[in-house]
Each structure stands twice: as structure tokens, then as C-alpha cells.
Image (cartoon, grey):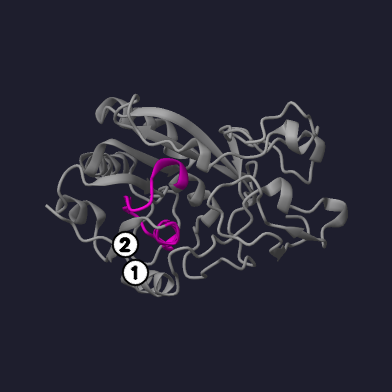
Amino acid sequence: MEIQTDRLHNEDCIEGMSKLPPGCIDLAFADPPFNIGYKYDVYRDDLDDNDYLDSCDRWIGQVVRLLKDDGTFWLAIGDEYAAELKVLMQRQHRLVCRSWVIWYYTFGVHCKQKFARSHAHLFQMVKDPKRYTFEVDQIRVPSARQLVYQDARADPRGRLPDDTWILRPQDLREGFSGDEDTWYFPRVAGTFHEREGFHGCQMPEQLLGRILRACSREGEIVLDPFAGSGTTLAVAKKLGRRYLGFELSADYAQKIERRLSRICVGDRLEGAEEPLVSAPSTTDGKRWASTASTNTPNNKRATGSRQKLLPGL
């Protein structure tokens, strides 16, 4: 059965996904509500724990059904349910965790009685640990040997990112390595050029770009069950992937459609790709920094393009 792609469906994702044939999706990325009381326009984000986990079980089940045998599923989730959902995906749905990435961001969510939240969890799950897409040469980054030590022994191709970047580059410039398993991408704050403005939980395009480049190929189908601000679909279109999205809110869906209508295949991704290159030091926060990356294949940005960064980013 041929499915129609490059579409956003304004409906509940469980109902919508149930209408699709099994094994039709190459890559799924989901950034669901975290059940922490966030104020969405039509969704209640404060369910009972059991109700929330039951809902997650049902929509994850649909994602697994739609994934091809060599497909990949990425889940973004907060601390509150990361452990439960990892166990659920592994034990109930028989997925295998290939990477547990920590996305560390500046402009964290400030809290009154706990340390400020500045990270989220990204789980890379596959059906078959011996057969799945992982395009290593699409996501290589400069190694510490290249960036910090100028070591002639460094592999000129760079290396794969690790799963955590633990320090901001401006805080400890000589100690920051842009190739670790905590990924440093700034959260899309209100003053950022790429912010769409209608959704408070917007993912950075560069973060999705890394995932789509690594785990899908041009022409393959990318699914987002919780389209939100439309970033997954926008990045998929820019990178030449086909896409399917679901969004419960009619208002959000309308604004996502407008966002997608402004995009063409091959457009550059918003945001700075390599934080060590793009982030200013705290002693020189107003400088202009190049956002061009010389080590990333298929980078659509022109060499020498520049972006003005905010002090302290």
C-alpha cells in the first residue's frame, strides 16, 4: 500500500498512525508532552502517572508497528519518565537501545527549589541491532586533537560525536570537546532568529539535522507523531526526506503548514552547527563568529556565512 507523504495530519497520533500500513517508516522522532503541567492549547499535560504511561505504551506501539525492520526510533523525554519509557520500549516493545544521548543546552529552565533544568534525554532505539541506518560520514565532528591540540596525528575526517557534551565551550574553552555523548545545542530561546513563536518547546534544527543525517537517507520517510512547532518536518524537507506528521492542535497545525510552505529542499538549517566554532567566549561575547563547518558533509551553508550571537550564549 502506497502512503501519501509530505503531509501533516491534524488529528490524534494514535488514531492517525493506526490507519497507516505496517513497516512503512524509515525513521521516527518523537518529542511528546513530558507530563509536567506545561500549558498546551488543547492537550492536558498533567495526567495520572498510569494514564500517561498507558498512553505512551499505545502510541509507542503504533510507532514500532510502522517502523521498517531496519528502522530507527528516537525519543526525546525529560527526567520524570525517562527510566520508565526506556524499560517500556525495551521490554514491552522489544526495541534495542543503541544510544542514550544527553542533550545539554544553555538557557535552561530555571527552577525555584532545584537545580536549573538544562538537559533532556534522547534515546536511539532500533528493531534489529545488526541492521539499521547509521551514516557515520554524515555526522562526523572535529576531534579534540584537531580543535584544541592541532595534533598532526588527528584523523582529518574527524570523529563521531559522543553522547554527552558536558561543558559549555565559553566556560572552559580548552577543556571542551565537541565530540562527546552529551550534545551541546542551545535551547531555542525567545530571542533566537529560528524561533517560530507559537510553541514553547521548539527543538533546534541542528539537533534534528544530526539525527536525520545519521539515521535516514534522502528520499526516505520520517515520522513525527507530535509535530509541535514543526521542526522535524521542516528539517526533513530541507534535507530531502519525505515526511509524515501528526498534531492534535488545529492552531499549531495551521502554523506548521505555513512554516513548511516557506521551506525548499536544500535550504540551510537554522542555528550554529558546531558550538565550539560558533559560541563566543564570555570575555568577548559580542564578537561575530563563523557558523560554517568545514568537516560536515552535505552542509548547505556557504563558507564564511556569519551569525550574530547573543552575549553569554
Toward the left, the furthest residue is 1
Seen in the image, is 303 located left or right of residue 44?
A: right
Residue 102 picture quarter:
top right
Q: Earlier in the sequence, mark 2 or mark 1?
A: 2
Are the residues flagged by discs 2 and 1 in contact, CB closer than 8 Å?
yes
Toward the right, the furthest residue is 283
Query: Quick one: quadrant of the C terminus?
Result: bottom right
Residue in front for this viewpoint, 9 or 115: 9
Residue 259 picture quarter:
bottom left
Reply yes or no: does residue 228 show up in magenta.
yes
Query: Disc 2 and disc 1: Cα gap in Å?
Result: 6 Å
Q: Work out whether residue 205 can be spotted.
A: yes
Kindly state the secondary structure of the residue where label 2 is placed. Answer: loop
Q: Which mark is residue 247?
A: 2
Amino acid identity at mark 2 = Glu
Q: Which residue is mark 1?
A: 253
Residue in front for this viewpoint, 268 or 276: 268
| Residue name at image x 52 percent, y 38 percent | 137
| Residue name at image x 32 percent, y 50 percent | 220
Q: Where does the magenta region start and end?
A: 213-239
Residue 262, image x, y percentages? 45, 74
| Residue name at image x 56 percent, y 33 percent | 163
Residue in front for this viewpoint, 74 or 305: 305
Reply yes or no: does residue 186 show up in magenta.
no
Amino acid identity at mark 1 = Ala
Residue 188, image x, y percentages? 58, 59
